[in-house]
Amino acid sequence: MTESVEDVGVDPSELSDDDLIRELHSLHRTRLDTLRHGSDPALANHLRRTAELETEYLVRHPGREVDPHRLRDGAGLE
């Protein structure tokens, strides 16, 4: 069985910044439902795609701003 574009999605490196953010929003919005109610293959695909998109985001934004208010006590900014 071959994977279709719907199964694998567009290569994250080919997405514009706006499309990358839109895809990340979509995955995060559907995360809990997929975890609780999705089939094993759906969950595996969701995990894989989330990792691909988040990795691409970090490649594009290695110096992203970290909100100091989101850090736990003792966790410093490096």
Image: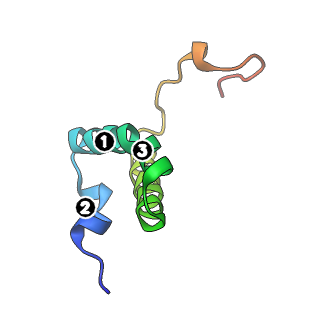
Q: Classify mark 3: residues with Cα within 10 Å, few (<14), some (14-19) or many (20+).
A: few
Q: Amino acid at mark 3?
A: Asp
- Name the residue furthest bottom: 1
Which quarter of the rendered picture does the N terminus lie within?
bottom left
**Which residue position holds label 2?**
10
Q: Classify mark 1: residues with Cα within 10 Å, few (<14), some (14-19) or many (20+).
A: few
Q: Looking at the image, which residue is at 24% across and 74% down?
A: 4
Report the side of 4 relative to 49 (left or right): left
Dot placed on the residue nearer the N-terminal end, 3 or 1: 1
Q: Nearer the viewer, residue 61 or 54?
A: 54
Q: Mark 1 and mark 2: span between their CA atoms? A: 14 Å
Question: x and y percent of residue 10 in the render?
Answer: 25, 61
Q: Nearer the viewer, residue 77 or 5?
A: 5
Label 3's element? Answer: helix
- Name the residue furthest top: 69
**Which residue position holds label 1?**
26
Q: Looking at the image, which residue is at 46% across and 59% down?
A: 43
Question: x and y percent of residue 69 in the render?
Answer: 59, 12
Q: Splitting the image into 4 quarters, where does residue 23 fall?
A: top left
Rendered view: 47 above or below 16: below
Label 1's element? Answer: helix
Dot placed on the residue nearer the N-terminal end, 3 or 2: 2
Q: Nearer the viewer, residue 46 or 10?
A: 46
Q: Looking at the image, which residue is at 59% across and 18% down?
A: 70
Dot placed on the residue nearer the N-terminal end, 1 or 2: 2
Q: Classify mark 2: residues with Cα within 10 Å, few (<14), some (14-19) or many (20+).
A: few
Q: Amino acid at mark 1?
A: Ser
Rendered view: 14 above or below 62: below
**Which residue position holds label 3?**
33
Q: Mark 3 and mark 2: span between their CA atoms? A: 22 Å
Q: Mark 3 and mark 1: span between their CA atoms? A: 12 Å
